[in-house]
Image: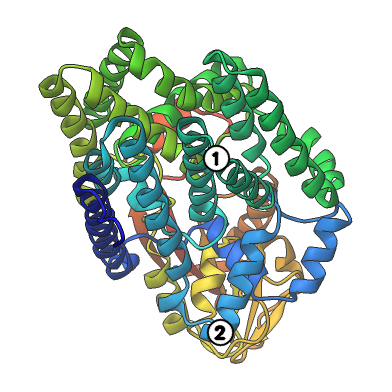
Amino acid sequence: MGTQPSDSAQGNTRGRAWAAGVLAAYGLFLFLTNALVIISEDEANIASAAGTSMREWVAAALAGQAGFHHPPLSEVVLHFWLRWTGERLALLRVPSIVFYCLALWIVAETAELLWGRRWTAVALGVAWPAGFLLGRPAGWYALSMLEVAGLGWCYFLWRKTGPARYLAAMTVWAVALAYTNYFGWVFLATLGADLLLSQPQRRQIVQFLGAAAISILAFLPLATELLNKLPGEVGQGPRLLPALLRDAYLAHSLLASEMAAPWTWPGMVAAACGAGFLWMGLERAGSRRALLWLALPLGIGFATGVVSGVRLILFGPGLLLFLASVLEFSPRRMASVLVAAAFGVGWIGMFTGRFAGTHRYTEPWPEAAARVAGLSRPGDVILCNHPSFYFYVSYQFPWEGPRRAPNLTMRVAGRTLAPLYRWRLAAPEPGGRFIYVRTALMPWGVSDEKSFLEYAAKDLRLAEEVRYDRDRSAEPKNRWFPEARQPEWRIRIEVWERKQP
């Protein structure tokens, strides 16, 4: 007669299933709220590239000449998804939402393995305000978080139980992560540091180094691409003081999201809570180890200047595990109050929209694109530099080819679309007008805008202007971060027509 499973094993299986069910419901919630988080510039560029020839950009990555700052695995996944779904906008983010919820499930399993804190981690993952923004965009974001979470889970399974199959699984996660995000090597190095600090056996060190060597060998096809990218990525941040301000802003945003900027009262509450978490984490030995998993890769990212708002998703597993450890080892009531306050003010910022540090996720590009489609008529020239505009407007007109800004000009439904630097090549037809969609510009676009507006002020008449999304924080942002030009109105649609004689 076979042995019956123990009550603890049955309870663990039920707990895993219930956690999976809760996170599946959360995934449905993310899907239903997709319209609340706008497809940003980076996401639009990635989705556009994934819809083009896979062979070309994979070949470019293998040749060390890829256009993106990350390896191509996520684009391969998205490419086949777009083909299968016919590029339906409503389904674009489904793979990312699935990856993100799987990542949260793995983080919960890791918390259960380490401290018996599965449901604490599930609650933290669902309540984490930054995840609501960062966990859904199409591209490398959620897939990278899933791989970081899987890498850590298999490492701790190997350390706790010993079977080599977990180390082999860790190696697979490491290779997948390296083919999704170059910063993934830092997370593998962090686990190596954790191993060395825990007084391992010689055999464990040898096994870990062997796994790392296999990962490196598997990554060699992309080594040239990584070496070509490093000079442009590492150490290219702003001067020291702006860099420190930016890093403080990003660390704060990881906790409360960018919807509660540190110069607003919700942001100040979140910053105080963050200081409390840091004090608690340093005070308890059990939390100090978890703090290392978060602080070491985050510190390396800040020191090299590679961390940005969208890249904060990489540190999600470390943050959630650290907070779970604080709730385990620190006074529970105090820690719970701090978590509720830090996450709560983030959601206040999300719901009100009044305290945002960035408008990347909330700019009303769908409405603006529809307005431009309605305002424009055949013979008009539509100028814009923003990838999100082109992505959304591609669903307003009959569109062929990539959903991105044209390199020169393109004709769509009798209209001419062009990036700003090509405005001189895009003359309106008789009776036609310029429709300029103004928004935040990269530094190289400022001179193009200046030259067009000088021409418009001299030879044209502003017939109509529509403004969207006022940024109440434009003044402090321009003062604190002078290297980033932030307009007061995030989107302005200007209709310029010929002056009447």
Q: Amino acid at mark 1?
A: Pro
- Structural distance between the alpha carbons of marks 1 and 2: 39 Å
Q: Residue at x 54, y 71 (%)?
A: 391
Of 226 and 430, which appears nearest the observer?
A: 226
- What element does badge 2 sit on? helix
Mark 2 highlights which residue? Answer: 84
Question: Which is nearer the eye, 198 or 86?
Answer: 198
Q: Residue at x 43, y 66 (%)?
A: 365
User: Which of the 4 quarters of the picture holds residue 200?
Assistant: top right
Task: Using the rendered view, name the quadrant where residue 283 is placed.
Answer: top left
**Residue 105: where, in percent of width, then height?**
35, 51
Q: Is residue 495 shown to the viewer in this render?
A: yes
> What is the number of the mark on residue 216?
none
Asked whether disc 1 touches disc 2, contact meaning CB atoms under 8 Å apart, the reply is: no
- Residue 294, percent across and down? 46, 27
Instruction: Say if 209 sits above or below 347 in the image.
Output: above
Image quarter of the N terminus? bottom left
User: With 73 as the anchor, is 130 left or right in this view?
Assistant: left
Residue at the far left in the pictured view: 333
Q: Which residue is mark 1?
A: 163
Q: Earlier in the sequence, mark 1 or mark 2?
A: 2
Give the total of numbered labels: 2
